[in-house]
Each structure stands twice: as structure tokens, then as C-alpha cells.
Amino acid sequence: QVQLVESGGGLVRTGGSLRLSCVASGRILSMYRMGWFRQPPGKEREFVGAIFWNSGRTAYGDPVKDRFTISIDNTKNTVYLQMNSLKPEDTAVYYCASQIVGGTWDYWGQGTQVTVSS
């Protein structure tokens, strides 16, 4: 199994920045990708972005392209989500998730609230 713990959420004004962290433990050697998802109030969960554990290659959802950046520190088993130019519509609970080799998004963190005020 993989355990994930997010941190770094909070309240920020429009145009501000936040950095979320997700620390992974457990079956790290089987890790394939780490992803960030979010669930706005009253809406379904949506894909934010993902990073391949070994190569660092990234992919992003359209709403956050050019504003959000995912990075990884393999020495700390930590993935980061740098969020810039935040908008009220970015308000959501943000979750990190992991995918091991041959699996899907099987493991999830507890979520961290991000609120962007207008």
C-alpha cells in the first residue's frame, strides 16, 4: 500500500499563490505516477495534473495550464503543486493520489482545503 499526506492548503486572495505538498510512504518502489485532483463545492472531482515518478514528466488539466506546476523531490518522496495566479474558481478540496505500476489511481490522501477569496 501507499500512504499519502497532503499539506499546505489555506485561504488566499485572488492572484495569490500557494504550494501544496504530498508526502508518500509505503510501496514507493512500485510508484508510477502521482496526481493532483480537486473537488470544488457541489461539483465532481476533476483532474488537476500528474507527474511520472521516475522521469518527472508532467501533464495538466486545461483549467490550470500555465498557472500550476507539479514537481517532485524523490529524495523526500514528496510531490508539490505550486499554484500561481489563483482564482476564486480554484476553490476546492485538493487531493493527491498515486498510481503504482499496473494500477490505477488506487491511493488517495485525506485532502486539503484551498479557498481563494475575490
Image (cartoon, rainbow, N blue to C red):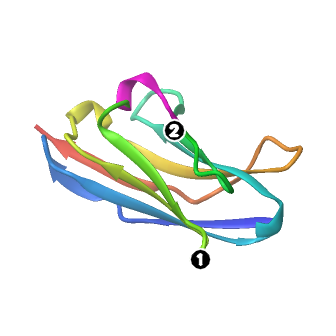
Q: In this view, does 1 lie above or below 16?
A: below
Assign a secondary structure to mark 1: loop
Give the image location of residue 16, x and y in percent: 15, 49
Quarter the C terminus occupies = top left
Residue 75 — which label?
A: 1
Q: Does the magenta stretch include residue 60?
A: yes
Near-viewer residue (37 or 113) = 37
Q: Which residue is drawn at 43% across and 29% down?
A: 42
Q: In terms of secondary structure, where does tag 2 sit?
A: strand
Residue under the point 13% across and 42% down? 15
Q: What residue type is labelled 2?
A: Gly
Give above or below for 31 relative to 118: below
- Contact? badges 1 and 2 (CB < 8 Å): no
The answer for how far apart the CA atoms under marks 1 and 2 are is: 21 Å
Q: Earlier in the sequence, mark 1 or mark 2?
A: 2
Disc 1 packing (10 Å; few <14; some 14–19; many ≥20): few
Residue 50 is inside the magenta segment:
no
Q: In this view, does 50 lie above or below 25?
A: above
Coordinates of residue 106 in the picture (x, y in percent): 77, 48
Residue 83: x, y in percent? 31, 47
**Which disc number belongs to residue 49?**
2
Give amino acid for label 1: Thr
Q: Quadrant of the N terminus?
A: bottom right
Which residue is at a point 59% across and 77% down the rendered structure image? 75
Instruction: Single out the residue that lies furthest toward the bottom.
Output: 76
- Residue 55 - label: none
Q: How many labels does the image show?
A: 2
Asked if residue 35 lies left or right of residue 64, the reply is: right
Q: What stretch is highlighted in magenta?
A: 59-64
